[in-house]
Amino acid sequence: MLSTKFTPKTKLTKAEIDRKWWEVGDYFRRNSLWLLMYCTGCCAIELPPSMTSAYDMERLGMGPMATPRQADILLVSGYLSLKTLRRLIYTYEQMSEPKYVVALGSCPINGGIYHDSHAVINQLDQYVPVDVYVAGCMPNPESVLNGFVDLMEGIKNKTMNGWKRYHEHYEWYKENQKNSLGEVIVHDEFHQ
Amino acid sequence: MTIVNFLIGIGIALFGFVLQTSIGGINRKIVGRMQKRHGPRWYQEFLDIFKLLSKRAVSHGWIFDFGVIMALGGIVGTAMFMPLTKDILAFTNNGVNYDNFFIFVYLLAVGMLGMAMSASGSGNPWASIGVMRALTTMLAYEVPFLIVVLTIINYSGQSSLTGIMEFQQMAGNNWFLIAMPLGGIVGFICLMGMLGKKPFETYIAPAEIASGPMVEYGGKQLGMLFILHEISVFIEVSLFVHLFLGGAANIFEFLIKYFAVYTLANLISNVNGRFKIDQVVTFFYKWPLLMAVTQAVIVIYFGWVI
Amino acid sequence: MASIELLILFLVGAGLIAYLLTKVNTFLGSIFTIFAVMFVFVSLAAYGFNMNMDTVVNYLPGISFSQTYLGFYFAIIIVFVYLMVSFFHPYYLNEYKYKDSYNLLFLLSLAGILGAFYTDNFLNLFFFFELIIWTTMFLIPQGKSREAAVSYFGFSVAGSVAMLIGIFVIFQNNGNSFDIATGLAALNGTNAIFVFILFLIAAFAKLGSFPLHIWLPIAHGNAPHPFSPVLSGALVKLGAFIGVLALIRIAPATGLFVAMDLPIGQYVVALLGSASIVFGTLMAIKEDDAKKLLAYSSMSHGGYILVAFSILNGLAFAGGFYHILAHALASAGAFMAIAAVARATGTTKMKELGGMIHKMPITYLAYLVAIISMAGIPPMGGFISKWLIFQAVINKGMVFVGIAVFFGSVGSFLYVFRPLAALFLGQEFREYKGVKEAPILMLIPTFIIMGLNVYTGVFPAGILEFINKIIVELGYTGITVSTYAINGSNGILNPALISLVFAIGVAIAFVIFIVLKKSRKVDLMDTYTAANFVHDEHLLHYSVDFYAPLERLYEKQSSWMKKFYTALAEKVKELGKLGKYLFMSKNVATTLFWIVAIIIFLLWGEVL
């Protein structure tokens, strides 16, 4: 017969401990998001006001970083041509996990005003997983910051797992990337 | 030496880390207010470091990791020798204090060597260029600084930091900042160089060489380098406090002096642009070196001290 | 009892046997050489420390020996370096044109070294010096160039001639006796200053110090790979030995600098030593060949030794003597690492190499330990000696020497890091895919030197106590050493504690590293390139003109000395042409006339 005198200590399984640590980590991660800005399009012009005195991104613990290794967010601001998409994927794969992608403007959603261009892709989501879209052409600084706050909320609720999706559906993403870009052979640093 | 000494040493290193990380955060807030911003939370630096430690990093081979460990180890070791006040220090035995000045200069160099090694080991050319700039900057600021320290040690007859502190606190002696004003100015300029503050921030230069030595780091390695950075700032600023500002009789005095020195350096940094690397060298070998030598000749050969 | 005479005779005999064995089989001859040198080292170490060597001479005519702590200290260091290097012979000799004589000359030069440090007679000293110079002169051209040997020989001869004149002055001054002890003691007045200057010329030439340094990079850079460590770690120390004789034993009574309490002669030497430090550092920063870079670093370290010996007190001498040991170990270690790389890849040019660490990790560690010592960073031996020298310089208040000493110390981080970054670290080159770690026989000395570099930095007390004996022998008071701590003039240093604390720090860092999430391993080419696709690892390797912005600042000034010596060589050549024109013309009558005229001139006072 089991004794009821002592309630047995609830043994946490390894998965539960990991989850607890992950939540602690999430607290730090959502309060210190570092950006790698991939400024390809016109939306980049909205970033200076959101960083400087007027909207002060730093009060959320955010700031620009120099290299993809150090950054948490890949900020895609604007349209992506085929050539820049190749670089974007390279950069995204260099980032250390967990990593998030935030897309500004309407171009990464559906091509925006460049939707019928031969050199511009229409849906960024086909190639790398996007966590937060900030719509608008261009979005004003309030909406940019709102997008970041959404990202933080999402990290808290564990819904921002685009980087996991990228791992799970790696073949699918690679397939799409190859279909649009084709495989190229690099001859030297100036010629493909 | 007992185990207690070593525990005190580790405590001092930990204290230095917490102190500098908090003061660094407060300084970010101060700079924010200067620029009419709200500024980050005061504990933002802690959040940054712990976030980095929680991420999954990349590694470029064993030397990349080993260098980081050696670097952090060297810096933690150096911090363990640092006296906080003239009574609070780790390694003391029957009135003999083992806190010789040269330990701080050269044991710090182990850490720097480890970091340089690791950065070069990543195989990124930006990292090597950053290391090259860091070493060149070191060549620039170290010589005037050591000449001033030569003057101080020659004059006070002490090369232990606590000894220099006590010498300044004795009745009739001024702080060396006042007693040797030229040397004090040189010391502060060299401190700016050591801290890598603008205009001597050439070797980080995020917009130019993609943050130099740190270009390939992310995750825990970068987090460890941030810890390293905080502790080395603690060592360098404390050195200035002890050498030029008369050290401290109690911990509050130390905190006040420390905060004042670091904030001043940070404020000066924020209104400056960046030198090119050869400008850094020519700058340090022109006025600071001349002032340091003048001060040394005045003090050593003429004996004129305020 | 080991007799010094028998050791020398043994080396000569062993040299002949080694010659024959090498002729039959290179490997066999080299192994024999290792054992011969090991025998000498062991007998020296077993009896020499307590001055138990037998100095009676039975067979060699006109040669006499005596033993001093000073001579033994130099001898044991140099023999040790010889022993370490001899392990490299089996793998290198086959490349050389005159490989048969290599081991013979090597052992003969070692015999010369034993003789030079144990003799008590100036003429013998000169004889053994010449033996060393002549044997090594034939070793150097086996490497890359003959010019190196010419340059080495030219400067050595200049030094030898200066020393010989000095010896004659002493001979005349000391009642026609060549005895070293009484000869040096009897010197005074102008004679003393004259001999002081002559001996210093010899010391500067051997040590490769400013302004007689030109031969050093040429000879070190082009010597056979296993001989460069001997040149830098051992043979330049002969200059330090003569420097000790001149600066400490002769120490002429020149005027005194009151502020520093130092004779002017000594202060001038200290300034020249400083110039050597600064010049060597700047040139080393600029150099692209790893061996030449280390050669310039030897020049700068020679400057430290001169500075230390010219500050006349026990503390500085302790620093100087310790620096001789520390630099011998460090530079031998570094040169041997470079030699191992050169064997594997066939080049020592840094711009052609990269990523060697992935192929030769142990060689890399050996180089790392050696350069940490060379840069004077704890926990290696170089830190102790530099600390002692700093203490002495600061205590004397030598501001201008201080600038050079500190500049050289920080500058050494720059130049020693360059081979580390360019040659060992960085991108892995595809042309060196097949390179392997050095063979086990070459790793033995590598490990021994690594261990000693650390030992000298952690437990210096035993060695410093021995150095104290030398200092007392020279007539000065030694420094205070306890089991773990060294007392300087204004502070105390505990090297063992520093090393322990450093180890604790590394342990803490390691724990932090290991508890955190494991990193994802990526390729070396997968680096941040601003998202450019770079396919060629040579483009991602930063090694050419490493310190370009710094070099640009003194580019114009860096060739002054070379130009001076080139101009000097031109002038000497022109003088030779004149002589040739006058005396060696095709017209026999002219030549005959001059010969007769000179004979008449020479016999003027005697016969005619």
Image (cartoon, coloured by chain):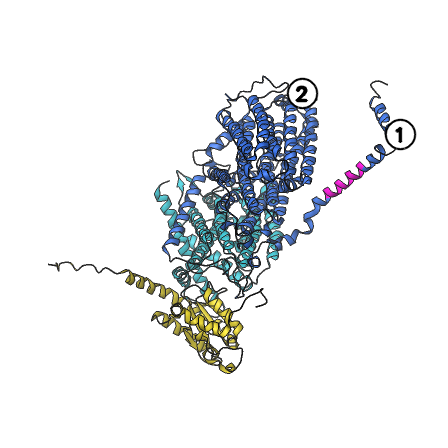
Is C152 left or right of B215, judged from the image as shown? right
Is C263 left or right of A157, judged from the image as shown? right
Q: Position of residue A34 (x, y in %)?
A: 45, 66
Write down the region rendered in magenta. C564-576
**Tag 1 residue:** C589
Distance of label 1 from label 2 (alpha carbons): 47 Å
Front-most of residues C173 and B186: C173
Q: Position of residue C152 (x, y in %)?
A: 67, 37
Q: Secondary structure at mark 2?
A: loop
Is C587 left or right of A90, judged from the image as shown? right
Front-most of residues C177 and C455: C455
Q: Position of residue B173 (x, y in %)?
A: 50, 45
**Is residue B81 placed above or below C265 in the rendered structure?**
below
Q: Colour of chain C?
A: blue
Residue C174 - label: 2
For label 1, the crowd category at 10 Å Cα-Cα, with few meaning under 14, some 14 to 19 and many 20 or more, is: few
Q: Amino acid at mark 1?
A: Ala
Q: Colour of chain B?
A: cyan
Q: Residue at left 39%, top 39%?
A: B93
* Main secondary structure type of the part rendered in magenta: helix
Q: Colour of chain A?
A: yellow
